Image (cartoon, helix red, strand yellow):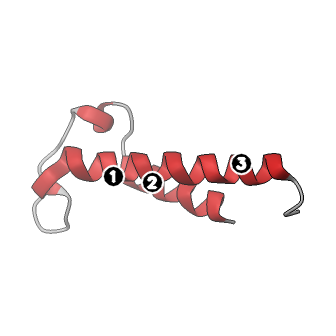
Amino acid sequence: IKQMNWLCLVGLLMVLCGESLRKAAMLTAGSNFNHISHVLVTTGVYALFRHPSYVGWFYWSIGTQ
């Protein structure tokens, strides 16, 4: 499978997009990105995804495989 360059490129793209989405979720949530304080954030990537950090982690983990 490593001979399929297009598949490696798709995986790399998934990793980069997933990591970018997760970092954007962390930056948007700021101090609310923890399990202690729970203030609803509805701006930035949270306006597009309900759980952008989990979505980013999912695509990052699939892309690494």
For label 3, the SS is helix
Q: Residue at x 75, y 54 (%)?
A: 8
Taking depth in this image into account, of 56 and 41 the one nearest to the observer is 56
- What kind of residue is marked 2? Glu
Q: Relative to residue 36, is residue 54 drawn left or right?
A: right
Q: On the image, numbered disc 2 is attached to which residue?
A: 19
Counting from the top left corner in percent of width and height, residue 4 is at 87, 54
Counting from the top left corner in percent of width and height, residue 44 is at 26, 33
> What separation in Å lies between label 2 and label 3 (alpha carbons)?
15 Å
Taking depth in this image into account, of 62 and 17 the one nearest to the observer is 17
The answer to the question of whether label 2 and label 1 lie on touching residues, with beta carbons closer than 8 A, is yes
Q: Residue at x 41, y 47 (%)?
A: 20
For label 2, the SS is helix
Task: Say few, some or many: other residues with alpha carbon within 10 Å of mark 3 (under 14 / 14 to 19 / 20 or more).
Answer: few
Q: On the image, numbered disc 1 is attached to which residue?
A: 23
Q: On the image, numbered disc 3 is attached to which residue?
A: 9
Q: Relative to residue 31, is residue 64 drawn left or right?
A: right
